[in-house]
Amino acid sequence: MIRSLVGAAFALAFALPVAAEVPPYPAGFRTQQVQVDGATLHVRIGGQGPAVLMIHGYGETGDMWSPLAAALAADHTLIAPDLRGMGLSSKPEGGYDKRTQGVDMARMLDALGVARVDLVTHDIGNMVGYAFAAQYPERVTRFVLMDAPIPGVGPWDEILKSPLLWHFRFGGPDMERLVAGRERIYLDRFWNDFSADPARFDEASREHYARLYAQPGAMRAGFAQFLAFDQDAVDNRALLARGPLTMPVLAIGGAASLGPVMGAVARGAATNVEELIIPNSGHWLMEEQPEATVAAIRAFLARR
């Protein structure tokens, strides 16, 4: 009897599914913890050739860039940090304004010995990317920004009127208590409502990111990213007063998301702008239409 129970338990253990994961980075990539001012960033690095800095947004981490890393690693060095407070980076109390996080990117590149990069960003990554490029324009060769506005720039005030963006003001201790233990439910709303087809944001990715956002301090830090937008708008207007970005910029958006306005977003910040709308995609371009998105980025970066 005992033997049969042990055997059944053993069989059940092997039948349980392992934790779901997103597609891995290519072989040869490494991770490194990089100390910046007031935070430690978890960074993925690999490939060879000109450097590309890839900055993720909310609801994901630097893991989102694995398809692009696979496509570019043969002739580019890829750098994919987790932003402060997100993923496997440390979760300090402050520093979530995007100007500070733009400096984070500069300090990280200094530590890695990288002087200049092509910049590829998505969602809140656009905001950090703009703050980096505006403060250090000599360090950015090209800039691809994808499907998110920039606080205080271009059509920001009009975009804020959308009722879908109530989460921009959602945060604080009571809201943290409200979502504690319900991180997956909260994040599903983003993955579902901002997708052209929610099934394209697969279950493995949802489980993976929900686990990361359930870490102690992770939701607080995520909310802090949004609650900094008012300060970000003030900072960005001051940065823009110095002059617009002049490096080539590609603004990509999903046809079912911000695709129709991404050109206006980018032209609010830069002078040399191309725009591209990806059909059959919402906000989550790398999950919904990875082939088309990667091809567009690769073609833009190939121009020298």
Image (cartoon, rainbow, N blue to C red):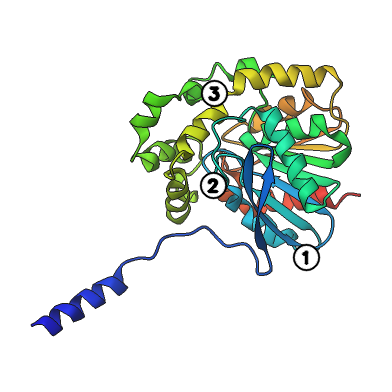
> Residue 23, percent across and down?
55, 61
Which residue sits at x=70%, y=58%?
45
Mark 3 element type: helix
Which residue sits at x=85%, y=40%?
139
Disc 3/disc 1 C-alpha distance (Å): 39 Å
Badge number at residue 87:
2
How many other residues sit within 10 Å of disc 2, few (<14), some (14-19) or many (≥20)? many
Report the residue that reaches farthest toward the left: 1
Report the residue that reaches farthest toward the right: 304
Give the residue type at disc 3: Leu
In-front residue for pair 22/44: 44
In-front residue for pair 151/110: 110
Which residue sits at x=47%, y=33%?
220
> Residue 288, percent across and down?
56, 48
Mark 2 element type: loop
Residue denoted by label 1: 74
In-front residue for pair 199/69: 69
Confirm or deny contact between disc 3 and disc 1 (CB under 8 A): no
Where is residue 259, by image quadrant? top right
* Lateral position of residue 1 relative to residue 91, left or right: left
Give the residue type at disc 2: Gly
> Residue 123, percent across and down?
61, 36
Eye-nearest disc, 1 or 2: 2
- Assign the N terminus to one quadrant of the image: bottom left
Give the residue type at disc 1: Ala
Where is residue 179, by image quadrant? top left
> Residue 44, percent across and down?
66, 56
Confirm or deny contact between disc 2 and disc 3 (CB under 8 A): no
Residue denoted by label 3: 227
How many other residues sit within 10 Å of disc 3, few (<14), some (14-19) or many (≥20)? some
